[in-house]
Image (cartoon, rainbow, N blue to C red):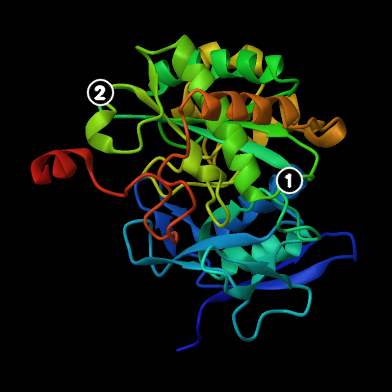
Amino acid sequence: MAREETTLSVPGPHGARDVRISSPSRVLWPELGLTKLDLAHYLIRVQEAFLAANGDRPVSLQRFSGDIDGEQFFSKNPPKGAPDFIRSVPVVYPSGRSHPQVVLDEPAAVVWAAQMNTLVFHPWASRAGNPDNPDELRIDLDPQPGTGFEEAVPAALELRSVLAEAGLTSFVKTSGNRGLHVFAPIRPDHEFLEVRHAVIAAARELERRMPDKVTTAWWKEERGQLVFVDYNQANRDRTMAGAYSPRPLPHAPVSCPLAWDDLGTADPRSFTVVTVPARLEDRGDPWADMHSEPGTIDTLLRWWERDVEAGLGELPFPPDYPKMPGEPPRVQPSRARAKG
């Protein structure tokens, strides 16, 4: 029996490329009946905005063996047999190990990733030509149980003010679930640890202004029903779903960039693989000019030093990281109290 497949002609900067799509009728989102071919067509329709946000960066591909409920895994280096237009760049991971990581440069590369069963794209905050120095400051506003998107919105708006006071212009997108991602373009003058410290400084300032709404507490048992300002997403090799990336949830949502004026009335469930292409065509990309005037993190780093002098030092790192200088003990507070 012949294997089902089709070929898409994908326009790009080097002319059209033919990209084979095997099993095009494989259903990825069962609730909506959306297929692998639907995913490829979605990525072609949003290609310009997608690549502006996620191209020319090391990217991790979240791949699925079946539909969104099936086995999944992350792929970082180009697999064997990748087309010659798939580029990679060596990056250094927290362990100190170096390894090549996929870079997406053109629409055909993105469609190829869909052919490889990629549903979610996780770009680094740095460019392929300078992977050690981020050109985006990123903050993940993560609603905890008992809170949701409605609670994340005022936190994002106040965070916008905090970053503006630090001299940064910020941009916002839905996470594709209940949260919000706030980005600010920055000059790639600092490595990841320094950018992390800048994010912590902004997060602490936001927490001071909204102590009953947001938290920087790393341990879940200490967060309560607040919006967690996830500073650890600023670390090397820590990523979040990229702009216009689909998410593996039943209604096929997309992590969708928004204009700040739209945030108060936005319904994150309405931004999906089905609806976002037409929205983008009608309204344009709110992030189109993001990198036209990058700022610096100098003010935020001064805030960091001010807080350190006041006794607020380093915060916990993710558990897969080596022990970092100045880091507090990685012991859950309740366990530490029990041992004491």
What secondary structure is found at the residue carrying circle 2? loop
Q: Is residue 169 above or below residue 101?
A: above
Residue under label 2: 146
Q: Which residue is drawn at 57% across and 19% down?
A: 159
Whether label 2 touches label 1, CB < 8 Å: no
Number of numbered discs visible in the structure rendering: 2
Q: Position of residue 241 (x, y in %)?
A: 54, 46
**Which corner quadrant holds the C terminus?**
top left
How would you rate the neighbour count of disc 1 (Cα within 10 Å): few for under 14, some for 14-19, many for 20 or more?
some
Q: Can residue 43 be seen in this view?
A: yes
Q: Position of residue 69 (x, y in %)?
A: 32, 57
In the image, 126: left or right of 253? right
Task: Between residue 47 and residue 35, name the one nearer to us.
Answer: 47
The answer to which image quadrant residue 196 occupies is: top right
Q: Position of residue 198 (x, y in %)?
A: 62, 33
Residue sticking out furthest to the right: 14
Q: Which amino acid does label 1 sit on?
A: His
Q: Which amino acid does label 2 sit on?
A: Gly
Query: Of tags 2 and 1, which is closer to the observer?
Result: 1
Q: Residue at x 33, y 63 (%)?
A: 70
Residue under label 1: 190
What secondary structure is found at the residue carrying circle 1? loop
